Structures are given as C-alpha cells and as structure tokens.
Image: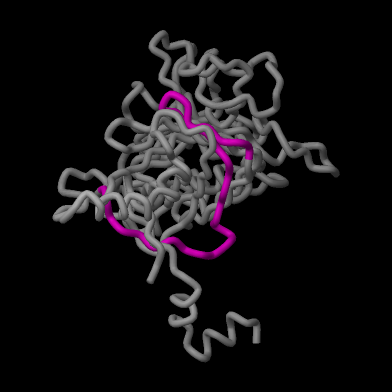
Amino acid sequence: MADIVMPDRRWRRSGMRSPLAALALLAAFAPSAMAGQTKGFVVSWFNQAEYADPQNRDCPHGVNDGPEIYYRRELTQSGLPKAEVDKYINEFLDLSQAQKTIPVAQMRGRINGKPADVYAIPTSMPDPHLKLVEGPMGYGFDLDGKNKKGDFTDPDTGEKGVDNQLYRVIGCINELKTHTLTDRPPLQLNYWNVLYEQMPAWLVEIDGMTDPQNSPDVTVTITRAFEAPTKDSGGNVETNLTFTSDPNPRWHNVVHGKVKDGVLTTDDFDMNMLGDPFWIQEFHFKQARMRIRIAPDGSLKGYVGGYHAWFPFYWQYGSEGWGVDATNNVDLPGFYYALKNAADADPDPKTGENRMISSTWLMEAVPAFITHPTESDKRAELTPATESMARGK
C-alpha cells in the first residue's frame, strides 16, 4: 500500500454505536492530530512574476519595438543597402514570403564580414540595448541581504532590496509583459497551455499543519509526479486528483517553514525540478525561498524566489528562433545581451561575468491527493532486468 497525503479535508466517520467507541477512535488518532496534518497540492501555474505598475512607472519609455522596426535597424547595421532593407521589410510583412524572409532575419549577424546565425550566436551582432524595467516596485525577496540602488520594493510586503533581475529584463517586452495585475503574459501563457497537460505535475506537500492560519513549524516538500495534471471543461486545473510522487531524489526538495496569518514562508534552500524541453529543461535554483498564501478554499498562491543560471531563459526562446523573434516581438539577440548584462550572482572565476540571475516566480496550486510508493511497492515494480539496473549491475 502506498502512503496517502490528503488535501485539505478530513475523513468523516458515521454510525458510531457508543461514545466509548468514539473516544477510542479519537485516542488512536490523537498523536497524529497533535503533530499536525499533511496537506497535498498540485501546481497549476509557475512562471516569472511581474508587477504591472498602475502608475506606468515600470516602462516609462514604453515597451520594446516590434520586428518591423528592429529588423530594419539591425539589417542596416549589418551592411545591407537601404533599398534591400526596404524590400525585405515589405516582403516580411507579407506572410506568403516567409520562406524567403526567414533566412535573412536569422543570418543578420556578422562574423568576419560573413552572415552568422543570430539565434545560435547572438553576439554576432551588436547589443541593441533593450528597454528594461525602471520602476521601483517588483515582487520577490532580498536575496543578497543588501538594499542596493536599483533594487525593487515588494508591493505586497513592503520589503526593500528585492532582487529580481529577470523581471527587469522581461518586463518591457510586450509578449512577455503582464499588462494588468490579474492577466497572464501572452507568450508565457501559450507555452504553459501547450506543456501543462503533457509534463508530469509538480507537487507540494505541507507537513505539520496544526492550523492553516498559524503553524510555527512545518515541513514543505516539492516533488515531481509520475502523472500529468488535467483540466476541467472550464480550463481550470482539477482539484482533489490523485498523483504518485516520483521518488527520484534529484527532484525531491525539502525545506523548513512556518505559517503566520495564513502565509507560508520557508528558510533558504536549493530547489531542483525537472521541467520540459519545450519550456525550461531543468530548474536549479540557489538560495531559493517561498512566500505562499493559503486561501480559504485550500488553494495556494504566492512566490518562489532564487538565483538561477540565466542562459536557459534565453534558450527557451532562442531555440525557437524566428518563430519567437518575428511573430512574438522578442528581439532574441537583444534578449540574450539583456540577460547576460543583468545577471547578478555566481561570477565566473576566469572572466568575472555573473552566471546566475535573480528571479521571482508566481506559483499557484490546488488541493490534491499524493501517494508515496513504499519500498515494497518499488520492489514489486522491478523486473529482474530493471532490478539489476537499479543495483548498478
């Protein structure tokens, strides 16, 4: 039998024949009740957290240009004559000419005077200097313990010194930008909708919950499931589904936390999680921490912050090339330079360039049942061949 983590609801017994029987049952369960409940959740949204400033201070110079503008500028910089640039832009706007125009955009870089693939080698063209977020507000955490010039202030908590350089980079790119406090960035939403019901679910467990509003000593576990989640007819993630936790230690993250006034916060920890090749292949956060509100309906909504290697965020879109560069208004070489320049942690010992970037991620989750295979379950699933492999023979 697998162990089962229950969502936020309790088993109800009926048909008790005497008060003595009820007392006996209560006594049997008293130790676990005192220790607190373990509640399970399945993640329903995980993506970069952005603040849509109602005063429009985030992007005072507007959002970044679209491809008609930056293609004209960058092709001119590459040495293409004006007449050819004008001809290209006219053809680019005609979708029937796409097969002819894609290679020109892709090879607008130059290495030793020869055309180069700007998606594979973004440095083959000069830095176009994307517009970055300049506003004072941004979700997240003071990861380095310093209130530096240019750091954000969290709009929810008022915490100063917030480090969220990933938001600084993406927050003025139209297709990656959150335009209101409640919407989803268009391009990120498209990616999520494609992968969500294909990728194995992410699971969250909170152990030691004596009170959903105030529990001073809880253990938070973030793991990967074997199964993918499903959505209901309204497009919402179904609640109270059953998932099997993947015992692979690579994707097993455990951290101490506490709940105060309905908000879960954790200590710092390293968080590793398998993603998807269409999205981010693997997540490896350093100095991660969580701040999650537990809603009355039992769902979770809040933030995960930490440092992460910056290059995978470029390659998520860079590997798609022209499809993102032209049709989703992301100047990919500019995106590469912006991420590299904004990186603020883990300097390379040889070059001194930072290899990691601070980031904050909005995470939402709904109640779920989580089962944990026991050792006997795992052994029963092993065939002689797989058992030998498991033992390294």
Q: Is residue 290 magenta?
A: no
Residue at screen point 24% across, 49% down? 238
Q: Is residue 373 above or below residue 147?
A: below
Q: Is residue 255 magenta?
A: yes
Whether residue 213 is visible, yes or no, is yes
Residue 191 seen in the current view: no
Residue 113 is drawn in which quadrant? Answer: top right
Question: Farthest bottom residue?
Answer: 384
Q: Position of residue 175 (x, y in %)?
A: 39, 33
Q: In the image shown, does 375 or 254 lie closer to the viewer? A: 375
Assign the N terminus to one quadrant of the image. bottom left
Image: magenta residue range:
239-268
Above-or-below relation of 298 to 96: above
Q: Residue 382: x, y in percent?
A: 48, 83
**The C terminus lies in quadrant:** bottom right
53 or 95, which is in the foreground?
Answer: 53
Residue at 64 percent of width and 31 percent of height:
127
Identify the residue shown where x is 33% and y is 50%: 26
Q: Residue at x 71, y 20 (%)?
A: 146
Residue 190 screen position, x and y as percent:
34, 44
Q: Is residue 184 above or below residue 117?
A: above
- Asked if residue 60 lies left or right of residue 7, the reply is right
Q: Position of residue 78 (x, y in %)?
A: 60, 37
> Between residues 362 and 1, which one lies in front from this camera angle?
1
In the rendered view, does 12 fall on the left or right side of 165?
Answer: left
